[in-house]
Amino acid sequence: MDRPVIDLSDLDDDQRVAATAPRGPVCILAGAGTGKTRTITYRIAHLISQGFVSPNRVLAVTFTARAAGEMRHRLHLMGIGGVQARTFHAAARRQLSYFWPQVAGSLPWRLLDNKFPLVGRAARGVGVESTTENVRDLLGEIEWAKASLITPDQYAERIVGTDRTPPVPAAKVAEVYRRYEAAKTTEEGMLLDFDDLLLHVAAALENAPGVADEFREQYRTFVVDEYQDVTPLQQRVLQAWLGDRDDITVVGDANQTIYSFTGATPNYLLDFPRTYENATLVKLQRDYRSTPQITDLANTVIGQATGRVAGTRLELQGMRPDGPEPTFHSYDDEPTEAREVAGQILTLLGRGVPASEIAVLYRINAQSQVFEQALADAGIVYQVRGGEGFFNRPEIRQAVSELVRVAQRTDLPDDPVAVTRAALAPLGLTPTEPEGAQARERWQSLVALVDLVEELVRAQPDLTLTGVLQALRQRAESKHPPTVEGVTLASLHAAKGLEWDAVFLVGLVENTLPISHAIKAGAHQVEEERRLFYVGITRAREHLHLSWALARQEGGRKSRSRSRFLDGVVPQLEIEKVPARTVRPRRCRVCGGPLSTPGEKVIGRHEDCPSGADEEIFETLRAWRAEASREAGVPAYIVFSDATLMALAEALPADRNELLDVPGVGPVKVERYGAQLLAVIDAFR
């Protein structure tokens, strides 16, 4: 059969070196946006076209089914079929199904799709409460241990030498792990989880010479993508596949190692040239995704990294035409940050940037709530990637259901915020952030919900708990349904492997990025947080906006500090250019006395002190607000609070800049209502 002719002219010099390297060990260090998938696809095609290997003798391993499908599609377009491109687990499942009778005889097995019940039963057996969060955290520890080749008997000792914090005492985790493993052997046969697929394949190849010989006769050439993310278990499988051969190509970027919490380690990538002394090493550093301005920032951020990973640093070279400089902005509080970001997104949309080419990226999922609200208020369609929207999260649905139940009581205190805190305490709202990834995520979501309740009460001080629930329901219903045409909201982890024309990196404060538990764990975890920040930066093609808020809530104490990863990165001049928001006066501008309520702080005086505003202006503004709220299908206070309308009536702003000086009026509101407000006010001048 005629072999396909592969045209290598589409590759740059470094890509061509990697694609045409002779059979044997090849290590491709590929930076973000440097065309690694294209390069390894061409390498496979070149080996086949030159007759070095048959298509059905190649096994390419990727970390997602999507990446495997993309590789098969690209090879098909080049006229090459028959290459096996699969994830580690998909390849192992296929192999185990074939070899099982040779290693286990007639003993039946089936894949365990849901590990929750077994782990929950094991947890209860050792006296650990089997809440959803506890079971998830225990399952995470078991999966990490198996990926790290740690048995139940070894767990308690081995965990001591790591930067992990078990969700319960290590001895109990080990016992849950032991009971879980025992429960998978039943009278009907064996239950295998996804990690067991890898363990059994490795064991079959290591201990059954006939199985190993048959497999190694079938597969001669191996390609591994995202090699910085392999676990010790996956490396064991890979070594079992290879045997004493060395026809392997790996590609990865240690600067993008962000999954160590699953057991992944970049050590195999970093050690590759020492493991294979005859290896060909190629660096891909020409970034075809991002502008030079973005790659310069990425290089600066990762250039401050410490530890072993920093020793193999790649220097990205932005190959796109020059673009705008990344911007840095500090805001007083999170709602202001969210409104400003929404305003900038409106500007980009107005310039023709598609909504689907814009992303807002944050460290933890709980951060999405304030941005979901700001985008919805601005009429911007969005989708939440890698998780449900805020109001659809299980912990939020459960919390709202509990508030509905509590609201039926007749003896409730007048403070709905205090009632909310008390009601959510049994659901995981502890005074301090708990240990355990799932418990932390639930806690963060509940804190965000309490913050939202506080925001609603500040806007309407006489709001009852029933009114709060109605407002929450309206906010949930006003959200736009997910659509591929919307702006993307995603965590930094969920953004890995994706890219957009414009990226907003938000919430860049200490204890969020780096996350608090990484700071407690030590330098190793902090450096992984830096790499996560680097991944976020390199998702942007042209527009990159970085921001942080000094307080969580409007009017809150500005106790936060920006992320340490911005030290030596943020241009001081750029920060000084950011206009400061008008600080709400703390004393009455009429009598000089202290102000106490949020409404008084908005208008800058006591409610019983004379305002000096024309009552007709205020009533006209209220009538306008009623019409605007009907058109938007939202409560009137969502448009503007009474306090903000009074502040407008007293200030009589003459242009957009003066509108922005009025507390409660932000860029999004000016974009949506500014012209109408000025027209109403001008009629009274």
Image (cartoon, rainbow, N blue to C red):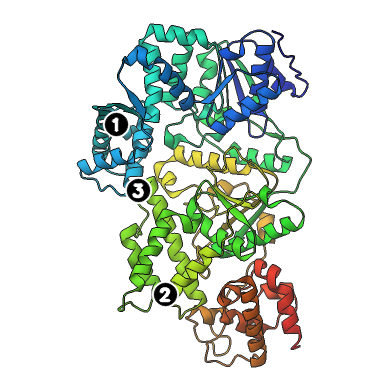
Question: Circle 3 sits in a helix, a strand or a loop, which is it?
Answer: helix
Q: Is residue 126 visible?
A: no
| Number of marks in picture | 3
Q: Relative to residue 401, is residue 661 drawn left or right?
A: right
Nearer to us: label 3 or label 2: 2
Q: Amino acid at mark 2?
A: Thr
Question: Circle 2 sits in a helix, a strand or a loop, which is it?
Answer: helix
The residue that label 3 is drawn on is 133
Q: CA distance from mark 1 to mark 2?
A: 49 Å
Mark 1 residue crowding within 10 angstroms, few (<14) / some (14–19) / many (20+): many
- Image vertical order of residue 609 relative to residue 284, above or below: below
Percent of width and height locating residue 22: 64, 10
Q: Quadrant of residue 71?
A: top right
Q: Is residue 617 visible?
A: yes
Q: Amino acid at mark 3?
A: Glu
- Image vertical order of residue 588 relative to residue 8, above or below: below
Nearer to us: label 3 or label 1: 3
- Mark toward the start of the polypeptide (3 vs 1): 3
Q: Please tell me which residue is depicted at 53% across the width and 69% down the height of the picture.
A: 554
Percent of width and height locating residue 262: 43, 35
Q: Relative to residue 133, is residue 129 drawn left or right?
A: left
Name the mark on residue 466: 2
Mark 3 residue crowding within 10 angstroms, few (<14) / some (14–19) / many (20+): some
- Image vertical order of residue 568 relative to residue 270, above or below: below
Name the mark on residue 403: none
